Amino acid sequence: MKLSKPHAPYVANKISIDLLNTSFIKMIEGVEPVAKIAQNILEEDMQKELVLEERVYEIMDENEDKMDFMQVDQRNMFWLIKKKLANEYGVILSKEDRYNNVAHLILDGLIQNDLIEFNVSDNRVKNIIFNSIEMYLDRFEDIEDIVLDKIRNYKRKLIPGSDEYSIVFEKLYQEELRKIGMM
């Protein structure tokens, strides 16, 4: 699964909670500044990918006639162009490598801002951050399914895409995250 901007605060909260719950990390100013740094770094990483994807779409639009003539699979062409331009835009496409890099950036940001102290190797702390991201990604779809089931069982039917649906979804989603200790 690819992280999107609405997930950034949840992942950041998961990271800050997991760091707080370790015995070898001390948070200097609490969880909120830690979550904020993590969220900013996650959003910056996502933004780089969005810029890359916009450029890929531009290239595809510019070459639409050629691709139609050659009967090129649009999805494969998108991936090939994205893969070719990824380094130029600073985007790591391998999910494991990408989230490992993001974990390093978050750790560096926390250290530079004097938000955490620890008496173990940097790599051990980085692994906690990485595992938080991975755990969120693993659990996201399960949580979403639970929330969608609850919405389907509402007495009053909600219309997907409506403001009311979004509010109820967000409330139930946060409730489920709290139940499993991710918020």
Image: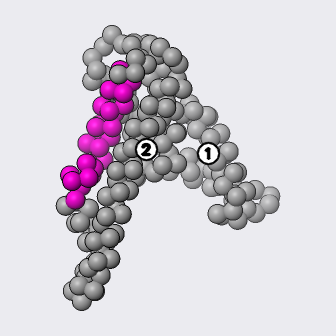
At 62% from the left and 41% from the top, the residue drawn is: 174
**Identity, as a three-letter code, of the amino acid under mark 2:** Glu
Residue 56 falls left or right of residue 139: left
Q: Position of residue 64 (x, y in %)?
A: 29, 81
Res 115 quadrant in image: top left
Q: Mark 1: give few (<14), some (14-19) or many (20+) Cα within 10 Å.
A: some
Given the current orientation, which residue lies at the most extreme top position?
A: 119
Q: Is residue 94 magenta?
A: yes
Q: Nearer the viewer, residue 94 or 59?
A: 59
At 40% from the left and 21% from the top, the residue drawn is: 113
Q: Is residue 16 visible?
A: no
Given the current orientation, which residue lies at the most extreme right position?
A: 155
Write down the residue under mark 2. 43
Q: Is residue 95 positioned above or below 13 on the image?
A: below
Instruction: Work out whether mark 2 precedes mark 1 in sequence or the reverse, and give the earlier one.
Output: 2
Residue 16 falls left or right of residue 47: right
Write down the residue under mark 1. 173
Q: Secondary structure at mark 2?
A: helix
Q: Position of residue 13 (x, y in %)?
A: 51, 32
Q: Nearer the viewer, residue 32 or 96?
A: 32
Q: Position of residue 57 (x, y in %)?
A: 34, 69
Q: Position of residue 41 (x, y in %)?
A: 39, 38
At 44% from the left and 23% from the top, the residue drawn is: 19
**Identity, as a three-letter code, of the amino acid under mark 1:** Tyr
Q: Main secondary structure of the magenta part?
A: helix
Q: Secondary structure at mark 1?
A: helix
Given the current orientation, which residue lies at the most extreme bottom position?
A: 69
Q: Is residue 10 visible?
A: yes
Please report the bounds of the magenta region as a residue range: 85-111
